[in-house]
Image: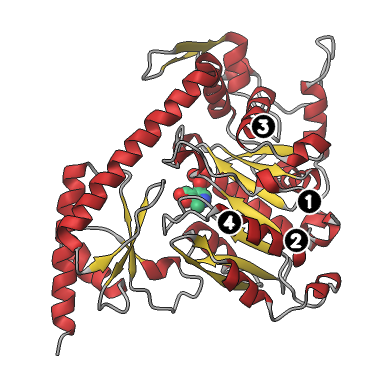
Amino acid sequence: MDYNRFISAISKARKPNPMRETASYVLSGPPTLISLGAGKPNPTTFPYKSIQVEAKDGSKFTLDGSELSRALQYSETSGISELRSWLANLHLKYHDPPLMKTDNFDICVTPGCMNGLSKVLTSLLSPGDHVLVEDPTYTGVISFLRPLPIKIIGVETDALGLNPDSLLKVLSRWNPKDALDADSGIPKVLYTVPNCANPTGASTSMERKKRIYEIARTYNLVIIEDDPYFFLQFNAKLAPSYQSMDTDGRVIRCDSMSKIVSPGFRIGWVSGAKPFVERIVYDQQSSALHCNTVSQVLAIKLFDLWHTDGFERHLESIRNFYRAQRDAAISSLNKWLSGLAEWSVPEGGMFLWVKIHKVEDTREMILKRAFAMEVVVLPGAWFSVDSKKSSAYCRVSYSSASPAKMDEGIRRLSEVVRDEISSLSP
Ligand SMILES: Cc1ncc(COP(=O)(O)O)c(C=O)c1O
C-alpha cells in the first residue's frame, strides 16, 4: 500500500516530539543511566502512599513504592509496555491479523476510543476530502467531522449493518482509477461500527464484510473499524473482524475498555499498519502525551491476576448481563409497543433501534412529550449524517435501567406514541 496517499497534510507535517522520543530512550535505558534531562515531577512529592484494589471476584492487589510512583508518573506515549503486549496477544487471539505476521503492525493506547478515532480521522482527512460514513452512526464521530472542511457522505445501513450495494452506489460517481488522481475527490476513508452498532444495534454480516473489504480494495479505501462492542456480542462465536481479513494493511481498528472494564479509565487503543499508527503516536506526543498511567497499571495488574481464564469469565458475565437486559427490553417492547412500532433484536451491545409507526420525525415527540412524561430515549435524527433529515426512529438503550424501570419507561413511551399519533389524526 502507498500509505503516503492516505496521510493528511497536517499529519504529514507533524514530526516526532524530541522530548517524548528522549523519554522512551530513558525508560528503556540501563539502570546505570543518569537522566538530568527529563522534566518529570519527583515522585516523593506525590501525596498518595498506596492504592489498594479489590475486584468483585475477590482478586486483590496493592500498588505502593516504586510501582505506585510509576503509576503516578508520566509514561510511554503509545502505552505502558505490559499493557501493549497484553493487547497484542488479545489481537492475536481474537483477530489473528495477517499484518502481525509481516511485522507491519502496531498498537497505540489512547485516552479512550473516541480520542483514538479523532486522531485517526485527523491523520487521514485533508480539506476538501470526501469521507464515507455509515448512516445513521455514532454521534461522537458526526460531531467531530461536522466542523471540518470536508464532505461527509452517508452510506445506508439496515438490520444487517452497512449495506455494500449502497456503498457501491455512492462510489459509482467515481472510477476506481480515480484513486490514482489526487484531485479526483474520490473518498479515501470509510468509517464503520461493524458490531452491535451505536445507534442501530445492527451487526454487519460476514458475507457483507467480505464484499465491503473487496470494494475497499477496488476503490483503494482505508476502513476505520470502530469496534467498542466487539466483546459484547452475545453469540458464543465472535464475528471475525475486518482486521482479521486485512491482508493489505488498509484497516485501522479502534477498540475500547469502556464497555468491558470502565469508561472512567479512558483506555482505548488504535491498531493497524505501522505507518498509520506512527501518525497517531506523533499526534499523541503533542496532545494528551499518553493515556492515564494509573488506569493502565490498574487494568494490567488485574488482567495479570486473572490470566486469560479470568478475563474470559469476566467477558462472559458481561455478555450474560446485557443479554438478560436485552431480553427484558424486548419483552417490554412486545408488551407495550406492538402495533405502534417495529424493531429488530440486536445480537449484542446496548441499543435498540425502534421505528415508530405513523410518526415521520420523532424529535418533537421525544423532546416535548416524552421528556414531559419523564422518559428519555434519543431521536433517530441525532444520529443522521444530514442533521435536517427526518427520522421515524428512536434509540432505546437497555444498558443501565433495571428490567422493572425499563418496563415502566417503555410503558410511558407507548403512551407518548399514542398521544402523538392521536394528535396527528385529522
Ligand atoms: C461506536 C462508538 N465508538 C466509540 C465510542 C467511545 O468509546 P470510548 O468510551 O472508549 O471513548 C462509543 C461510546 O459510546 C461508541 O458507541
Identified at 80% across, 41% down, the residue is 17
Identified at 73% across, 28% down, the residue is 39
Mark positioned earlier in the residue sequence (2 or 3): 3
Mark positioned earlier in the residue sequence (4 or 2): 4
Say which quarter of the image contains residue 392. bottom left
Q: Is mark 3 within 8 Å of ligand 1?
A: no
Tags 3 and 4 touching, CB below 8 Å: no
**Looking at the image, which is closer to me, 26 or 180?**
180
Name which residue type carries label 3: Leu
Residue 92 bears which disc, if any?
A: 3
Q: Label 3, label 1: how many angstroms apart (C-alpha)?
A: 17 Å
Mark positioned earlier in the residue sequence (3 or 4): 3
Q: Label 2, label 3: how many angstroms apart (C-alpha)?
A: 23 Å
Residue that badge 2 annotates: 217
Name which residue type carries label 4: Glu
Q: Residue furthest front?
A: 207
Tags 4 and 2 touching, CB below 8 Å: no
Q: Tell me if residue 326 can be seen.
A: yes
Residue that badge 4 annotates: 207
Q: Label 4, label 2: how many angstroms apart (C-alpha)?
A: 16 Å
Name which residue type carries label 1: Asp
- Callout 2 environment at 10 Å: few (<14), some (14 to 19), or many (20+)? some
Q: Label 3, label 4: how many angstroms apart (C-alpha)?
A: 22 Å
Q: Position of residue 46 (x, y in %)?
A: 56, 19
Which secondary structure lies at badge 3? helix
Q: Tell me if residue 302 can be seen.
A: no
Which secondary structure lies at badge 2? helix
Identified at 65% across, 68% down, the residue is 131
Residue that badge 1 annotates: 248
Mark positioned earlier in the residue sequence (1 or 4): 4
Q: Position of residue 248 (x, y in %)?
A: 78, 51
